[in-house]
Image (cartoon, rainbow, N blue to C red):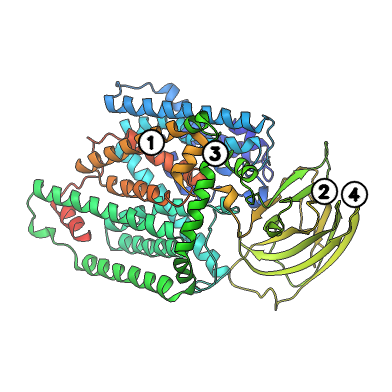
Amino acid sequence: MGLFVAAHHPLWAAQLPSLFIAWALLAGLFPALWLAVVPALLPLASLSPWTGWIGGDEFDLLVLGALAGTRLRLLVEAPREAPSRRVRLAWSGLVGLACLYLLALGRGLIDVGSTRFDWFQGYEEPLNSLRVAKSFLLAFLLAPALRAVLRTRPALARRCLILGMVCGLAVTCAAIVWERGGYPGLFDFSTPYRTTALFWEMHVGGAALDAYLVLATPFAVYAVAHARDFRHWVIASLLALLAGYACLTTFSRGVYLGAALAVLCALVGERWSVQRRMLLAIPATPDAAVPRWRVWGNRLLILALGLELAVIVGIGEFMGTRLAAGERDLGGRLRHWSESLGLLADAADALFGIGLGRYPAVYSQSVPGRELPGRLSLVGEGGARPLRLLAAPGNPRLRGKFALLQRVPDPSPGMHLLTIELRAPRLAIVDLGLCRTHLLYAETCLRRQLVVPAGGEQWHSFRVPLPVDERLFPRSAWPRLAFLDLRLYGLADFVDIDELDLVGPEKRHLLANGNFSDGLARWFFAGHHYFLPWHVDNLFLEIVIEQGAIALFVQLTLVGLALRNLWTAQAHDDSLAPYLLGGLVGCLALGIVSSVLDMPRPAFLFHLLVCYALLLDPRRSPGAPRSATETTETADIV
């Protein structure tokens, strides 16, 4: 399956199959390697704005490669011992949840009324059901390999997971520093700009970055608390400061709540474990004194984090505005939840949900005034065929809140020439923009409006000069990204687009697939300042609505068992357990105000960490301190 998907990649179809095979072989030869590589590459492994893939991405290939390699190894290595009662209970729960996911997937495909899949389908089409289902199903299929490495090499599994999570968090923090440096500015905390990093799933809003940061931030605290020497402590402290900056510049109240709770739970659990070890362990020896650099370093780090919080939240105007609007936002959120629960039409929907991935389509069709602001479809059959850009019919306030995009190089000074053919049944206004944009917020745009007369089947050709000068697009040391941006205004409910071309000052053609002969390959889209139809904005309601109350009960039971297992492992001196427990608790807290499971990459990470916690043997303690010195130092840290 992975080879089939790799062969249809829009950018590197020739190279990806061989890379996929090489990665699968490595994952099979080194059984714990995937546990480091997959979390480390998770923030990077998606090129959706360049490829146009939404239902699947490069991260799926990464996980499928790990799955192929580990499955081959499991065929060779037979289990040497019968699973314990606790593991059998965990497996029963996971299998039951997998059956519920498949049932909800089937209900979603039946509801959409089609099983015709396309690589570039959006959020109302059959592929969206698979997009939502794949996160748990891939984690579930990796669970046997996870169980095998936890049974035979628990210390190695723990080290690989920590390494992968710390590296992934470092990549995310670096992306955030680059994004903010290149767009609003590293120290601009008043401009209404919310960070998205490399989580392109947020092109229609959502909490992909939020969920990832809440799950990953406790690992930065772990790195500081368990640094072996001064050099490692400095690196870990820098990561902690960057993670704090990343969380704060999301300007998300859910991230503030979830990350704070995650770190607090981790530190309380660590403190409890340390006190327990100090009561039972070897008496302190004279050489067990805590180094003074660590004591003062930890104090300075706490002071720096407090100063960071004060500057970003206290001095910046944007977060103050968001906090002031909290009461109004709560009223709107409660109304949104009530409207969403109204989608459950009968007892079957309440028990088994309306189907995975069906929320955007059903909500936008059922709730008046909550339509999707736009959608894309290809007209006719065959190869080269025009693209139809549709707006929400009869709802003028949503015009311009949906954009057709293609990634282009950062505009260089000189004349750019755009050619395009358009037709519309009624008067339409197409707003074109050459925009320096990371994802949702444009730093600057060169915009033109084209008036398309009502003409039915008649095409109208346009040549649009776009003079770029350095005053509008100033040069910067930060590398920046750009989009060609098209939006629909006017009276028409749709406009057909064909033969798009953008020629730069060096006479280089900057667009790919301008006649849509490859479908929607290389084309992307985004919502703007209106994201309600795409997300429930509540973890628990999204499970109930799409999978049903039974699935919610099973998932909460499994998460409860995972947290209990981590608590027991913590009592048995597993040094990672408090931090993993904190991340999961923080993610549940974030889920009160955000959807988590409709964003595949963070949803996969959540399910993977739950599986790790469920299948962990709490009687083994690969991370327990082995000396009085380490016990005393950890006590001082927390």
- Where residue 247 sits: x, y (%)? 43, 61
N-term mark: 1 or 2: 2
Nearer the camera: disc 1 or disc 3? 3
Residue 515 image label = 2
Badge 4 crowding class, 10 Å Cα cut-off, few under 14, some 14 to 19, many 20 or more, is few
The residue shown at (34%, 58%) is 260
Asked if the residue under mark 2 is in contact with the one under mark 1, i.e. CB atoms within 8 Å, the reply is no
- Where residue 35 sits: x, y (%)? 42, 40
N-term mark: 4 or 3: 3
Asked if the residue under mark 2 is in contact with the one under mark 3, i.e. CB atoms within 8 Å, the reply is no
Tag 4 residue = 456
Q: Left or right: where does residue 78 sit relative to residue 37?
A: left
Q: CA distance from mark 1 to mark 2?
A: 45 Å
Asked if the residue under mark 3 is in contact with the one under mark 4, i.e. CB atoms within 8 Å, the reply is no
Residue type at tag 1 = Cys
Badge 1 crowding class, 10 Å Cα cut-off, few under 14, some 14 to 19, many 20 or more, is many
Name the quadrant of the C terminus.
Answer: bottom left
Tag 1 residue = 611
Residue furthest to the bottom in view is 471
SS at mark 1 in the image: helix
Q: Is residue 442 visible?
A: yes
In the depicted structure, whether residue 417 falls above or below residue 53:
below
N-term mark: 1 or 3: 3
Q: CA distance from mark 1 to mark 4?
A: 56 Å
Q: Left or right: where does residue 470 sit relative to residue 336?
A: right
Tag 3 residue = 132
* 236 and 349: which is toward the camera: 349
Q: CA distance from mark 1 to mark 3?
A: 18 Å
- Where residue 243 sits: x, y (%)? 41, 61
Q: Is residue 37 visible?
A: no
